[in-house]
């Protein structure tokens, strides 16, 4: 047996030696014999390393070097591993996989499962590729149980002993982890099992998720707000309102850092929901100079009012809704909508002269808004015919004359309007609008006319004089 054996007879002879009775002490003899062989140390180290890793050529090498006891140990260990592999295949429902060699990729996968180690994605893909569906089902169950255990630790529910996947607690803990709102049934389930810490963590986590929602720019729903109120988290509601208020100020172009939260937050929220505001409140805010009459909030208010009167006219057929709608469309800076409301009207079918005058006045005002002054004048004069004692068409005629640069004629019309009940503030409002909308030389002209006429009453026009001076200086320097 100590002679050199050819490669062709190696495994037959190896099998023959496995059938021999080998003394337990001969291992050391073989080892000693091996050390006497004329074999370099690096080569020996290489083969011993292969032995440790169970390389397939190890038996040949051991046999050729007559390490018979060592070879027997190798075969014994191989048999143990193969038996273990078979047991694992049976345990994890992988027996249908035909390969029995421990060099199969399945063996380390099953060993990882047995050691309660999480499988990698590549290992899971391997099982799926080889259609080991039952094994995959077991893997899924193991992962779910591990997940359940981790959730119990994370959410302070370890006192609950039931670890079955069908447990309602597992469903509850998954909801918490997904930042879902717990229903009353889930809360009662936790209360009955005295899992108070779990409840606290669940409420905090859901409140934190709502706060993240706010930070991302989303609005809280009514259900969210109700939940926060019921669970004593008014701090999150306040946080949401402050964030929304800041966003609404940007939308409505409010640059005043001292712009009061109350009542404007509630007002802007209503506008966003397209709910009508209290007209008295709006007028009061404008009078108190807390709200600009031509600002975005006021314009949004007028738009909603215009839509309201449009719908009321469609609902009731009452034509008094038309001048109201037209007036609000004008104040919302939508003169075309104002004209649309009052077009195609058969005045012969309208009995009330007061209504005819109101319709023509507001229509004339809309023509003025789009600089169609001739059409505006026709409407104003016709309105005067229908109702000579109303100050509104006279005021409109005065504004038209000022737009044309006919200031003295405009003053005459304004005086007639005052005789019929117009307020000085109404006249001044029209004049401010003329100055604001005028361009360059035209603006200078009307400003100088007003300041010469009454420097005290029209002191506000000085601001436009300064503004013009500043613009002139910038043009010269550019």
Image: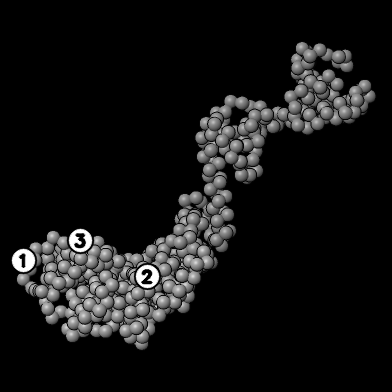
Pick whichever, 400 or 102, lies toward us: 400
**Residue at image mark 2:** 441
Q: Can residue 133 be seen in this view?
A: yes
Instruction: Please give left or right for residue 421 compared with residue 286 in the image.
Output: left
Label 3: state its secondary structure: helix
Tell which circle, 1 or 2, labels the residue nearer the N-terminal end: 1
Q: Which of marks 1 and 2 is in front?
A: 2
Kindly report the distance in space between the C-alpha atoms of the residues bearing marks 1 and 2: 44 Å
Marks 1/2 in contact by CB < 8 Å: the verdict is no
**Residue at image mark 1:** 348
Q: Residue 177 carries which label?
A: none
Q: Which of marks 2 and 3 is in front?
A: 2
In percent of the image, x 85 and y 24: which residue is there?
67
Kindly report the distance in space between the C-alpha atoms of the residues bearing marks 3 and 1: 19 Å
Count of numbered labels shown in the rendering: 3
Kindly report the distance in space between the C-alpha atoms of the residues bearing marks 2 and 3: 33 Å
In percent of the image, x 7 and y 68: which residue is there?
350
Q: In which quarter of the image is the N terminus?
A: top right
Give the image location of residue 245, x and y in percent.
43, 70
Other-residue count near label 2 (Cα within 10 Å), few / some / many at <14 / 14–19 / ≥20: few
Label 2: state its secondary structure: helix
Other-residue count near label 1 (Cα within 10 Å), few / some / many at <14 / 14–19 / ≥20: few
In this rendering, is residue 13 above or below 105? above
Tell which circle, 2 or 3, labels the residue nearer the N-terminal end: 3
**Residue at image mark 3:** 340
Give the image location of residue 410, x and y in percent.
24, 77
Other-residue count near label 3 (Cα within 10 Å), few / some / many at <14 / 14–19 / ≥20: few
> What is the quadrant of residue 36 in the picture?
top right
Pick whichever, 297 or 106, lies toward us: 297
In this rendering, is residue 12 above or below 297? above
> What is the quadrant of residue 326 in the picture?
bottom left
């Amino acid at each position: 047996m100590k002679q050199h054996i050819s490669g062709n007879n190696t495994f037959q002879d190896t099998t023959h030696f496995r059938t021999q009775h080998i003394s337990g002490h001969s291992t050391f003899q073989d080892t000693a014999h091996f050390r006497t062989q004329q074999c370099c140390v690096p080569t020996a180290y290489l083969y011993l390393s292969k032995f440790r890793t169970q390389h397939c050529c190890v038996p040949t090498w051991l046999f050729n070097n007559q390490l018979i006891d060592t070879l027997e140990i190798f075969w014994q260990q191989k048999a143990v591993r193969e038996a273990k592999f078979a047991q694992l295949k049976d345990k994890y429902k992988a027996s249908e996989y035909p390969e029995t060699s421990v060099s199969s990729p399945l063996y380390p996968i099953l060993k990882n499962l047995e050691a309660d180690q999480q499988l990698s994605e590549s290992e899971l893909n391997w099982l799926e590729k080889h259609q080991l569906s039952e094994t995959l089902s077991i893997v899924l169950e193991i992962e779910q149980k591990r997940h359940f255990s981790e959730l119990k630790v994370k959410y302070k529910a370890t006192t609950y002993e039931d670890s079955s996947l069908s447990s309602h607690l597992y469903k509850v803990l998954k909801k918490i982890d997904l930042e879902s709102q717990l229903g009353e049934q889930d809360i009662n389930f936790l209360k009955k099992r005295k899992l108070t810490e779990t409840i606290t963590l669940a409420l905090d986590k859901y409140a934190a998720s709502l706060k993240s929602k706010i930070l991302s720019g989303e609005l809280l729903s009514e259900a969210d707000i109700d939940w926060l109120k019921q669970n004593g988290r008014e701090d999150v509601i306040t946080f949401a309102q402050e964030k929304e208020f800041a966003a609404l100020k940007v939308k409505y172009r409010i640059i005043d850092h001292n712009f009061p939260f109350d009542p404007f937050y509630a007002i802007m929220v209503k506008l966003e929901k397209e709910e009508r505001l209290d007209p008295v409140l709006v007028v009061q805010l404008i009078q108190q100079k807390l709200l600009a009459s031509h600002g975005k909030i006021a314009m949004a208010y007028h738009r909603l009012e215009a839509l309201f009167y449009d719908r009321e006219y469609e609902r009731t057929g009452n034509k008094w809704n038309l001048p109201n709608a037209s007036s609000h469309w004008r104040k919302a800076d939508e003169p075309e909508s104002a004209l649309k409301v009052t077009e195609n009207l058969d005045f012969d079918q309208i009995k009330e002269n007061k209504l005819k005058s109101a319709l023509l006045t507001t229509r004339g005002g809309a023509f003025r808004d789009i600089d169609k002054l001739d059409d505006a004048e026709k409407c104003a004069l016709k309105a005067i015919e229908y109702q000579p004692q109303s100050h509104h068409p006279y005021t409109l005629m005065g504004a038209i004359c000022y737009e044309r640069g006919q200031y003295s004629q405009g003053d005459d019309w304004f005086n007639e309007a005052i005789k019929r009940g117009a307020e000085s503030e109404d006249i001044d409002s029209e004049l401010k609008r003329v100055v604001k909308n005028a361009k360059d030389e035209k603006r200078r002209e009307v400003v100088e006319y007003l300041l010469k006429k009454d420097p005290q009453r029209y002191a506000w026009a000085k601001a436009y004089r300064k503004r013009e001076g500043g613009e002139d200086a910038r043009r010269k320097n550019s």
